[in-house]
Amino acid sequence: MELDISHATLEKLLTQTSLKQRYVIGVPLEREIDEHRVGLTPRAVLLLIEAGHEVRVEANAGAMAGFNNVDYVEVGASIVGIEEVFDVDVIFKILPLNLMEIERLRYNAVVFSIANRTQSKQYFSSLSKKKVTAIAYNKLRGSKGNLIVMDAVCKIIGNACPLIAGEYFSSCHKDNGYIIGSVAGTPPTEIVFLGATKVTETAARIFLSMEASVKIFDRSLSRLQEIKNVLGRSIYTAALYHDLFQDALSKADLVIADSFSNEEGEYFITEDMVKRMKCDSLIIDVGIARGSSVETSTPTTVKDPVIVRHGVSHYCVPNIATRFPGVSSEAFTNVLLPILLEFSKGYSFHDLLLLYKSLRTGVYMYRGIITDEMIAKKYDFSLRKLDILLDMPMC
């Protein structure tokens, strides 16, 4: 996280921060079905405790990610109930708060979580009434403009795709022992990717190492060229022409679909295309949480992840990363580490936002005021620019 302020201003802030600000920090239990990650790992909590902050962890918040209550107690955290965990200055959570949780927040609390523009108007209104400052992990950008948290999540999902496919094919084809890849004298597994994305880049690299046949389709020639350069080997890439794409789908053993916007609201993989695919082939719809590009997809669960349409299996779990909650939680901690280190210096949150541009990129609400243009436009909220709000005198 890079400093984004003049040295003169920094010296002034350091002078003003002679008395370090101590925070009470809450790590709630994730209550949504299939969400097994935790907002902070014990390693992250230790960092905050050593800096003098108080950390409250809701009972069993880390259990599904492999971190028990004792792990948190040993690094100095308090294990508390639902009332105490939300009665704090700062919340670190994975999924957005529900309305009941928002109601329990302190006024002027700071909330870190994943958030998107598909949340209800009531969600944003409830946060606003509490004068919350809200930061979306999935909006945080690094110095190069990359989405730092989502890059980590996409890498996990990309690594998961070969594991999911291997599980499916070994169970579906157990009579003839089907494996992914290529063995001398046998045809390679045919894998088609829809979207030249970070998920595709990670998964394709693994499948290529298994000597599978990989084809990547995207509307953007620049993205196709970029992924071809990154993978650094002979790989089939093509623009998303209907006939060419449909032919590839009809021969595919595995399709990995990562959604991207279609202004006409049409599906890139239609039901008719699915009908022409091989029986017992598999579609992994990794983008279903953001709006599927596959007409026959329907969201599924970790417990019951596959549905079958026209003889084609569809893996449509909206949150694939939660299948690996320990690794995913550690990945969040690694991305948050620079922010947590800045907490240890005792700055007010207002000053942290002044100091660090990367942190500002994630803010969609500041003290109850919407600062995200798309959210304001969608729900007819008043919009204020964050930079202007930060220049205002502190009340």
Image: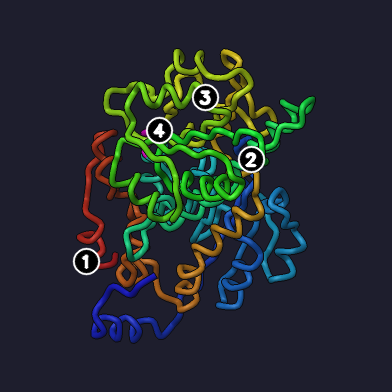
- Rounded to the nearest angstrom, the CA distance separating label 4 from label 3 is 41 Å
Residue to which mark 4 is pinned? 120
Q: Quadrant of the C terminus?
A: bottom left
Asked if residue 170 can be seen in this view, the reply is yes
Amino acid type, mark 2: Ser
Q: Is residue 180 above or below residue 55?
A: above
Q: Quadrant of the N terminus?
A: bottom left
- Mark nearer the N terminus (4 vs 3): 4
Report if residue 119 lies within the magenta region.
yes
Q: Between 338 and 148, which is closer to the camera in this rendering?
A: 148
- Mark nearer the N terminus (3 vs 1): 3
Residue to which mark 2 is pinned? 182
Residue to which mark 3 is pinned? 251
Q: Position of residue 51 (x, y in %)?
A: 55, 77
Judged left or right of residue 349, residue 103 is right
Q: Quadrant of residue 294?
A: top left
